Image (cartoon, coloured by chain):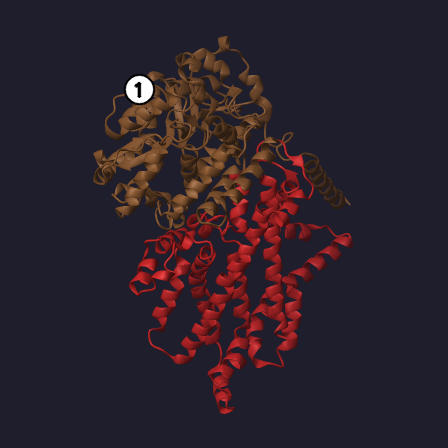
Chain colours: A red, B brown
Amino acid sequence: MTPGNDDARSRQVRPGRSMPARVWSGVGRATKEPDRARTASIGAASRAHRGRPGEPRRVAYLYILPATAVFVLFVLFPLVRSGWFSLYDWDGLGTGVWAGLANYEAVFTEPGLRGAFLHALVLIVFYAVIPVALGLLLAATMTRARMSGLGFFRVVLFLPQVIPMVVVAVAWRQIYEPQGPLNDTLRAVGLDSLARPWLGDYTAALPSVGLVGTWIGTGLCLILFLAGMAKIPRELYEAARLDGAGRLREFFAITLPSVRGELSVALTLTVIAALKTFDLVYVMTSGGPGNQTTVPSYEVYNNAFLIGRVGTAAALALVLTAVVFLVTLVINRIGEKADE
Amino acid sequence: MKQFRKHGMWVTAASSAVLLVAACAPGGGDDSGDGGGGEGNGTQGASDIQTDPSQLGDVTLTVWDQEVRGGQAEQIKTLNAAFEKAYPNITIDRVSRSTEDLRTTLRLALSGEDAPDVVQANNGRPEMGQYVGSDLLVPLDDYAEAYGWTDRFPESVRALASYSEDGAVFGEGQLYGLPQMGEIVGLYYSKSKLDQLGIEPPETTEDLEAALAAATDAGETPIQFGNSEPWAGIHEFGFVQNQFVDAETIRDLGFGRPGSSWTSDGNVQAAETMVSWVDQGYFTDGFNGIDYNTAWQDFAQGNGVFFVGGTWLVADLMEAMGDDVGFVLTPAGASGKHLVTGGTSIPWSIPANSDAQDAAAAYIDFITNADAMTTVAETGNLPVVDAGQQEATGLQADVFEAWATAGEEDLLVPYLDYATETFYDTLTAAVQNLLSGQSSPQAFLDTLETEYTAATGS
């Protein structure tokens, strides 16, 4: 995510291809401003070196002070402090004992903690992969089909995004109950053998939680892709039609490349949502049955606040942050790569 | 140059801050206030204590409690008002939170300079044990002497709030808190259902198993059970274990003391019996997916013959079922004793960083004295002492009697998750695994034994 790079690339790309130019030009414009600021500050620095009073320089610091102060206070300081905690064996009350990297070792070796990360990987399928695929499919159909009542469906599918997560979790917990609506429906249509205590079932619990994520994420992906596809000029499809392209060919040759930007945004948002899941698990299963639905964020909470292993919790949180950071980086790289 | 020098100062300041941070462990040194202040305050001697609150001058007493539900909220409101009326010089600043919220905020509050004066600190090792180990609570022995708490509260009740000074030994040592209410996990039964089946409330394990079989034959749900909030499983397993294992073993295991074993014959029988009950359909279908509230509410609505539950449900069940519900101690098993899992409500303690400790002790005495116990009983709760002297009818009378018997015959055994700081997680997951057939009774007990021996070194 280096703005300078994007900028250079977008300039390079613009003349050759008409389509992505619009997508990238926005990025180009946005990154120009910092560039100018950078030039200005270099100018100021060289002026200061020449011995002129450093007033412009001081003013520049003043401008960034509020943002920097907030950043340092609420992001950098807690991050550094967590890193510091993570090196100690500390219950959050007494004096910590130096533990070196033992807490990090625990994150990767303790079955309970490692399991939490594995569950998060499964959740990525439900939170990110399925919603993105569904969203693409729905959006492509909705844009091309010119159906009536489009606005209504958009609202309905987006609605889960608006409801607070805890409410969603409570509602779904009731749906999944052994005597809940889901099982009642299954029994009503004669699928008695499928009915089960969904959240208490060892194999069904994690997918059950994941499906709620799918339900929430699909609407978001759909809206993003609809917006992206609305910008595709109809002429492109006409041209493709004349060249003899079918629906499928149209989708892969025109629609998909055109929403690459949206795709990378959708993936980033949903993958992060999957990795940081807490509320659904906290309300619906408390990590059970057994340890089938534990996730990293829940384990951070459990270790820090319930069993007093603050060091382990901090290490776990930092590893989770690193994973989120890496995944975001990779997704964005892929987005860029595809452009070349 | 002037600017450069300034810059240099910043760098020096920043790097020395980093060094400072790196040099001291979290919680050590100046970082979290004077955590060690407790000992000095606690050892002032019984004779120096001012037991007349009206002599303490104007005091604002900050009290953090979790008495937010029904009868619990009612009793503490009544008692607070009475205390303020009796001692106008003391103002109570009440901060009430749910149990969970209190638990998560208490850690920071206790280690801070501006700590509350009275708090409810849960008995177990992850809470009271850790607070004691970090010198954040005042030992109450001198106050106990001054106020006569030692005579008033039986050993079994005090043990549940007693720790060694370093917090390592639970169940003996110094006293760190006093509870208002008793708590036992017994057997609720539906009177009308038992009448229909033509059986009496079970006295022994045989009686119980016969009743469960009869209920199954009659198409009833024998035991209502919801275990999606997995602590219910601790109570359910404890209920079975109490019928097969002797009190001393359970106490060793529960308090995390060396000398006993999870793999004893009794424990094996208990685990196997519980699995056989699952296999025979004695518990609600799909219990791992049902939450606790749904389970007891179902029982209250007339589904299910029995419900294994704590006395905190008395008020709710009485309201819903009236005279149709009864309560007995755990049926007696091999030991012939009606051992019952239980303890006390969350004890009231005094933080070491409190600046009004004498007033705090006076408050704790006030909300646990004989008059207070009457208030506690009147609001539908089970008073920790004097239960026999309260007027009660119906379900409440059953519960008071059971509690009194448990006290007289020394039948109380602790909650099993007290054992180690992480035993709650281990046990809840293990019970879920056992009951859903994911692990065998032997594997279940081995899991528990491993953690128990690692913690006790036996």
Residue nearer the viewer, B68 or A220: B68
Residue annotated with mark 1 = B388
| In front of the other: B196 or B411 | B196
- Residue A207 is situated, as x and y percent measured from the top left of the image, at 46, 59
Q: Is residue B229 visible?
A: no
Between B399 and B127, the one nearer to me in the picture = B399
Give the chain of mark 1.
B
- Answer above or below: position of B237 versus A318: above
Give the residue drawn at x 42%, y 32%.
B242
Residue A199 shown left or right of residue A180 in the figure = right
Q: Confirm whether residue A330 shows in the render.
A: yes
Tell me: residue A93, above or below residue A213.
above
- The quadrant of the image that shows the C terminus of chain B is top right
Vertical relation: A62 (above or below) A29:
above
How many marks do you count on the picture?
A: 1
Left or right of A243 on screen, residue B14: right
Residue A185: x and y in percent read 31, 62
Q: Quadrant of residue B240?
A: top left
Q: Is residue A188 above or below residue B56?
A: below
Quadrant (top left, top right, bottom left, bottom right) of the N terminus of chain B: top right
